[in-house]
Image (cartoon, rainbow, N blue to C red):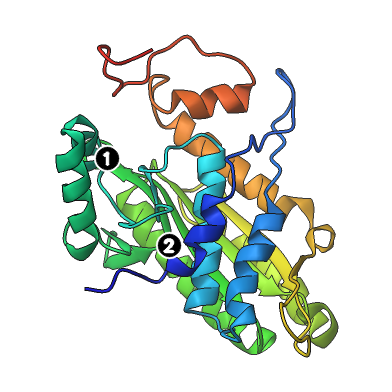
Amino acid sequence: MAREDAFSDFDALLAGYQLTDPWEHDHGEAPLYAPDYRLLSSLLGIPLDARQVSESGRFARAIDAWTAHELRRAGFSSDEVWPRPTRPRVLARDVAMLLEKLPRKLSEDVASRLPDLAAVGPVDAKVLGRAYEKQVDVCIARWDRGPELLISTKAQVSSFGKNLPNRFEEAYGDAGNLRGRYPLAAVGFLFVQRSSVLIQEPDAFERTIDMIRKLRDPGDGNGYTATGLILVGWDDVAEGSVAVEVREHEVPADVAAPQFFTAMIRQVLTASPISFHVAVRSLLERRHIPVREADTDPATDA
């Protein structure tokens, strides 16, 4: 069996990154989220260095790996955010808790077998929507709570205006499919677009911003909880390592990544009791919350 999967190229880089606090506001202030764009640039540089640039495959996986890392920075645990930073990428929290309770040698043996058991530890998370099954790029879910966060990521590196209508149609359909079955979940759409659109097709960039805004729920239960846009650029003729630049100042604040992560995280917390995701709440609210996490074992709680 292969010991690598679609995310393996990013494992070493992610392993060297600490989960820094993403919030820059103080207690009592409006939330201010600061994405780690440096990590995104480094992750995207891996497929670009290999000259594997496309709107799917390794380039898209790099976006997924970064998005999942951002949620872990916000306080969600490695096991509950899929894709996980190590194999298996999707692992039920209950299985992870079982591994924690097993004797070390047995736990290591079982864990080593999981990546080869696709039914137990798959690479992709698939959920049933209202009308059809959907592969979700980034997910937080548990059997006892159901899906709490579902994110679809898309990349566009060329043919901007030509492909936008298809992107809009696909995205809107997916929003209805997922929210129709999981109305309390945070359902998001994160769009990464190459910054060459600013020069080549500025009209397509304006339509992209409009699309990102219109895909959101206007208050009637239709559309996404949150949507976001990230612009990235690089030099096609560069030799050696490709430097990726995130053009954050070109994106309006109301569609930028900070508001996207803020809205998604707040929806997860709004739709769950205070004893769920206590670490996430504490980071967001900039204070210690004296509540035990719901699934913490009192016998081992420090």
Viewer-closest of 225 and 114: 114
Q: Which residue is mark 2?
A: 137
Residue 176 figure quarter: bottom left
Which amino acid is tagged 2? Asp
Neighbour class for label 2 at 10 Å: few (<14), some, many (≥20)? many
Q: Are marks 2 and 1 in contact (CB under 8 Å)?
A: no
Image: 47 above or below 238: above
Please report the residue visible at 25 percent of the width from the left and 12 percent of the height from the top. Answer: 299
Residue holding disc 1: 93
Q: Quadrant of the N terminus?
A: bottom left
* Residue 40 position by quadrant: bottom right
Determine the CA span between mark 2 and mark 1: 18 Å
Residue drawn 83% across the image and 63% down it: 250
Residue 11 location (% of width, % of height): 47, 60
> Looking at numbered disc 1 in the image, what kind of residue is underneath it?
Arg
Estimate the x, y position of residue 179 in percent, counting from the top left: 38, 53
Q: Residue at x 78, y 90 (%)?
A: 237
> Within 10 angstroms of label 1, few (less than 14), some, or many (20 or more) residues?
some
Is disc 1 placed on a helix, strand or loop?
helix
Q: Nearer the viewer, residue 78 or 159?
A: 78
- Residue at the extreme top: 290
Q: Quadrant of the image for the C terminus?
A: top left
